[in-house]
């Protein structure tokens, strides 16, 4: 077992308590000014400062340790000044714990080129017309200085630069913020990936400079930790170069250059090679700094992340699919709207310990989904978020007790088996 602590006097700290041999997995604690996060942990997403359909108190009760919101959406509405005046994101949304904000880079670019809402992870089914919708107006333009984009809300023009992203995220006031990066897809050319990577590296320096300046200027505010983002798509040399570069990156302040407090692993990732790609990066990144895998949250991918050195995850999937009546169970996904659930007077999953499973049947959920009742989204979201939060908590417990791979085999044996059968 190795013990690593990152000394820090600013309220942000990461301490590894368990690091099993022969694996990149680790168990630790991220400390922030708004509280601690026991890792590995799943961080539910509240894009616009709300986890849709669920109260913050309920999120806390179901085990969420932190929430992640999005700087792009909050920039457009209600605007960073409103959040700053409110006392920051956590206070504004009545969330009694740590918060993250995604830099907005992904949204600026994804809403700009007409991506589907979810970046497909399987390259085989990832058609180019999914990436760039032919009939959709291009809403974003990237250059070396930043990104100009049109608001998807009212068509107004805006510009994000690394400096603007830092200013916006400082005003929003989350505990953990991300550097502004250019998020590419698996379908960009190798040459374009190289160019985007260098751009992201240079933007990283500008983010560090602006972050350092704002941290000093706003020294009365709680400290915000800045994570650098590692891109490089599916290319081994580019991923390794990005990890090496980002780990070494420092602000230009000659007296006290600062580096990143942690790292976000980003980009379109192919499900089949996820583990390999994470290994390329995590073998290079400094072990004592936390690593966040951006936008990944399917059960099978969470295992791959944890055993390859990821500390935190975020993903909108759990709540987004819940609102379409899709729920996780120990034996795979179920769709509550299906007729088979009409007289299923039993919980979604009898092994689940969530509020919904303790109090409601699939038959009732089927009824409220069919009737388009608002409570349907609430109950299904509570279950899905609890399922994913608990799964990662169980991985953490299994890493501590030393039976992680037994736990994984047991879980995946049942989960994959029936979810495969359920596919038509
Ligand atoms: Zn449940």
Image (cartoon, grey):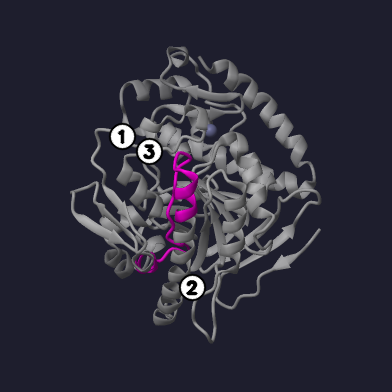
Q: Residue at x 63, y 51 (%)?
A: 310
Q: CA distance from mark 3 to mark 2?
A: 32 Å
Crowding at dot 1, Cα within 10 Å, few <14 / some 14-19 / many 20+, comes out as some
Across and down, in percent, residue 167 comes to: 35, 69
Viewer-nearest residue: 72 or 373: 72
For residue 223, which numbered disc appears in the image? 2
Assign a secondary structure to mark 1: loop
Instruction: Specify the segment rendered in magenta.
Output: 166-195
Whether residue 15 is in magenta: the answer is no
Residue 202 image position (x, y, % from top left): 46, 66
Counting residues from the start of the chain, the first of labels 1 and 2 encountered is 1
- CA distance for labels 1 and 3: 12 Å
Mark whose residue sits in front, 3 or 2: 3
The residue located at (23%, 41%) in the rendering is 137
Residue 37 percent location from the top left of the image: 58, 58
- Number of marks present in the image shown: 3
* Upstream in sequence: badge 3 or badge 2: 3
Which residue reaches farthest front? 191
Q: What residue do we see at 50% from left, 23% from top?
A: 334
Q: Is residue 214 above or below residue 68?
A: below
* Residue holding disc 3: 117
Numbered disc 2: secondary structure? loop
> Which quadrant: the N terminus?
bottom right
* Label placed on residue 233: none
Q: Residues within 10 Å of mark 3 (few under 14, many from 20)?
A: few
Q: Which mark is residue 133?
A: 1
> Can residue 77 be seen at all in this image of the molecule?
no
Q: CA distance from mark 1 to mark 2?
A: 41 Å
Q: Which of pointers 1 and 3 indicates the residue nearer the eye? A: 1
Q: Are marks 3 and 2 in contact (CB under 8 Å)?
A: no
Identity of the residue drawn at 26% across and 47% down: 139
């Amino acid at each position: 077992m190795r013990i690593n602590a990152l000394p820090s006097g600013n309220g942000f700290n990461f301490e590894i308590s368990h690091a099993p041999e022969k694996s990149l997995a680790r168990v630790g604690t991220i400390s922030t000014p708004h509280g601690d996060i026991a890792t590995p942990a799943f961080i539910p997403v509240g894009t616009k400062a709300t986890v849709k359909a669920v109260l913050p108190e309920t999120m806390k009760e179901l085990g969420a340790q932190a929430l992640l919101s999005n700087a792009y959406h909050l920039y457009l509405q209600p605007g960073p000044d409103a959040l700053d005046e409110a006392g920051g994101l956590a206070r504004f949304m009545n969330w009694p714990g740590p918060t993250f904000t995604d830099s907005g880079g992904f949204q600026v670019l994804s809403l700009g080129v007409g991506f589907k809402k979810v970046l497909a992870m399987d390259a085989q089914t990832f058609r180019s017309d999914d990436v760039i919708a032919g009939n959709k107006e291009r809403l974003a333009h990237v250059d070396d200085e930043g990104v100009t984009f049109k608001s998807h809300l009212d068509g107004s023009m805006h510009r994000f630069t690394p400096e603007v992203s830092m200013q916006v995220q400082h005003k929003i006031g989350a505990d953990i913020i991300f550097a502004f990066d250019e998020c590419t897809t698996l379908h960009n050319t190798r040459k374009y990936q190289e160019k985007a990577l260098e751009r992201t590296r240079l933007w990283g320096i500008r983010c560090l400079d602006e972050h350092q300046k704002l941290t000093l200027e706003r020294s009365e505010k709680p400290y915000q930790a800045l994570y650098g983002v590692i891109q490089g798509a599916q290319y081994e040399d580019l991923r390794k170069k990005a990890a090496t570069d980002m780990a070494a990156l420092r602000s230009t302040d000659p007296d006290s250059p600062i580096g990143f407090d942690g790292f976000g692993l980003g980009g379109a990732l192919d499900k089949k090679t996820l583990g390999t790609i994470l290994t390329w990066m995590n073998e290079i990144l400094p072990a004592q700094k936390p690593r966040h895998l951006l936008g990944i949250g399917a059960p099978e991918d969470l295992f791959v992340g944890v055993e390859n050195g990821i500390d935190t995850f975020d993903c909108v999937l759990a709540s987004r699919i819940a609102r379409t009546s899709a729920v996780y169970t120990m034996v795979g996904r179920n769709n509550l709207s299906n007729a088979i659930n009409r007289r299923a007077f039993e919980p979604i999953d009898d092994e689940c310990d969530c509020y919904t499973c303790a109090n409601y049947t699939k038959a009732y959920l089927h009824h409220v989904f069919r009737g388009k009742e608002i409570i349907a989204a609430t109950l299904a979201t509570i279950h899905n978020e609890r399922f994913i939060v608990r799964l990662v908590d169980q991985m953490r417990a299994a890493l501590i007790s030393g039976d992680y791979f037994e736990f994984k085999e047991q879980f995946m044996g049942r989960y994959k088996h029936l979810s495969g059968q359920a596919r038509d």
